[in-house]
Amino acid sequence: MSDTGGIATERLRSFIERVERLEEDRANLNADIREVYAEAKSAGFDAKTMRQLIRLRKLEPAERQEQEHLLEVYRNAVGV
């Protein structure tokens, strides 16, 4: 492993290449997700609503309940 100015160049290169591969994987996954949403849309589902539902499912039950309660409070406050 060569050392340039106190930097282990091979180790640094390894980290950079790993990040580049992961970013490429992420781009591929994002493209796959877009395809799934497009497929769902063509089947008559609303992608925006699906995204909201997925976001809610990621929350812990208590946090989800708190957000739903606050939303209801805010809706009532503005007459929606």
Image (tube, rainbow, N blue to C red):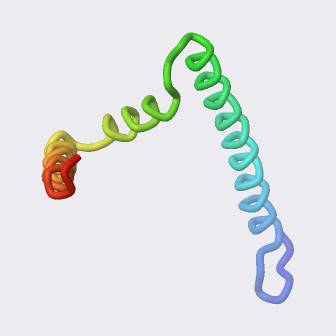
Q: Residue 61's spot in the image, x, y percent?
A: 17, 39
Q: Relative to residue 78, is residue 5 depicted above or below?
A: below
Q: Nearer the viewer, residue 61 or 50?
A: 50
Q: Relative to residue 14, is residue 41 depicted above or below?
A: above
Q: Residue furthest top?
A: 43
Q: Answer left or right for 53 relative to 34.
A: left
Please give the name of the residue rendered at 56% of the width and 10% of the height, measured from the top-left corner: 43
Q: Residue 33's spot in the image, x, y percent?
A: 61, 30
Q: Residue 67's spot in the image, x, y percent?
A: 21, 50
Q: Answer left or right for 30 relative to 72.
A: right
Image quarter for residue 15?
bottom right
Q: Residue 21's spot in the image, x, y percent?
A: 75, 47
Q: Nearer the viewer, residue 75 or 53?
A: 75
Please give the name of the residue rendered at 86% of the width and 74% of the height, measured from the top-left corner: 2
Q: Residue furthest front?
A: 79
Q: Residue furthest bottom?
A: 5
Q: Nearer the viewer, residue 75 or 54?
A: 75
| Mark count | 0
Q: Nearer the viewer, residue 79 or 34?
A: 79
Please give the name of the residue rendered at 32% of the width and 34% of the height, measured from the top-left corner: 57
Image quarter for residue 78?
bottom left
